[in-house]
Amino acid sequence: MPINIAMDGPVGAGKSTIANAVAARLGILHLDTGAMYRAVGLAALRAAIPPEDEARVTALCGKLAIGVAHEADGQHTLLDGEDVTGLIRTEEVSMAASTVAKYAGVRRAMVAVQQRLAATTDMLVDGRDIGLRVLPDAPVKIFLTASPEERARRRWEQLREKGGTDTYEQVLADLRRRDDQDTHREVDPLQAVADAVIVDTTGLSFEQSVEKILAIVEEKRHA
């Protein structure tokens, strides 16, 4: 039986980068489920389907082949065979992903793929509903978070490095909208499940955050 680690948390908490580092230290794979919803959002935008149109987005999702490939430099996200890893990190795709991720049909399709992948190998899976829906029986569950202001600062700095022009205030406002959408959606809202360990990285360095999670994993594995 594969050993799975479930990691949830809000946008900008650093799940992907921290999960990458933790998985590498543990010698297991990392599955970024948020990238899969971003791929659906990108597909909707490309097809000129408004992300708010649940029926058309759900129908489109049923026709898409969303997959992942684990390469030396990390996870690559595939959309109908095309590597879209470098195309799904814009703010437009981020907001589209948050919208399409509300739909039951989209979530059912993505969760099925995620569970199938996690059933075959040791894996750290991160997203919004991992402990709740994707891996409810995972022996280790982490809820990674930080203050909205800290998460917005980190995201703003990342965007600036990529040439983004949004102000910190705009990034913070977008983040608060994402938080509201993710925590209030009807289907599998973002939440810390009862048996998750909450890790608040506000004020922690990247390495301190990684070490804290590794300590939790070690403790849980030997409990």
Image (tube, helix red, strand yellow):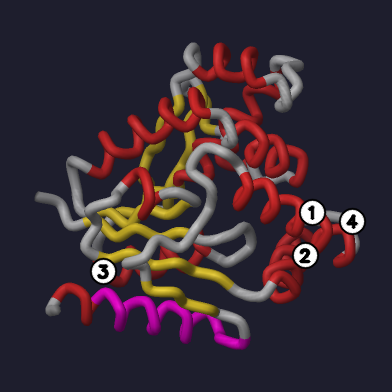
Crowdedness near tag 3: few (<14), some (14–19) or many (≥20) residues, C-alpha within 10 Å: some
How far, Cα to Cα, is label 4 from label 3? 37 Å
Dominant secondary structure, magenta: helix
Q: Residue at x 57, y 38 (%)?
A: 186
Which residue is identified by label 3?
Answer: 26
Residue stretch rendered in magenta on the structure: 203-217
How far, Cα to Cα, is label 1 from label 3? 34 Å
**Element marked by disc 2:** helix
Amino acid carrying label 1: it is Asp
Image quarter in which the C terminus is found: bottom left
Mark identifier at residue 165: 4
Tag 3 or tag 4, which sits nearer the N-term?
Answer: 3
Amino acid carrying label 2: it is Trp
Q: Residue at x 70, y 75 (%)?
A: 150
Decide whether residue 80 is among the magenta residues: no
Which residue is identified by label 2?
Answer: 156
Which residue is identified by label 1?
Answer: 174
How far, Cα to Cα, is label 2 from label 4? 9 Å
The correct choice, above or below, for 176 with respect to 90 in the image is below
Badge count: 4
Crowdedness near tag 1: few (<14), some (14–19) or many (≥20) residues, C-alpha within 10 Å: some
Tag 4 or tag 2, which sits nearer the N-term?
Answer: 2
Q: Residue at x 71, y 70 (%)?
A: 148
How far, Cα to Cα, is label 2 from label 1? 11 Å
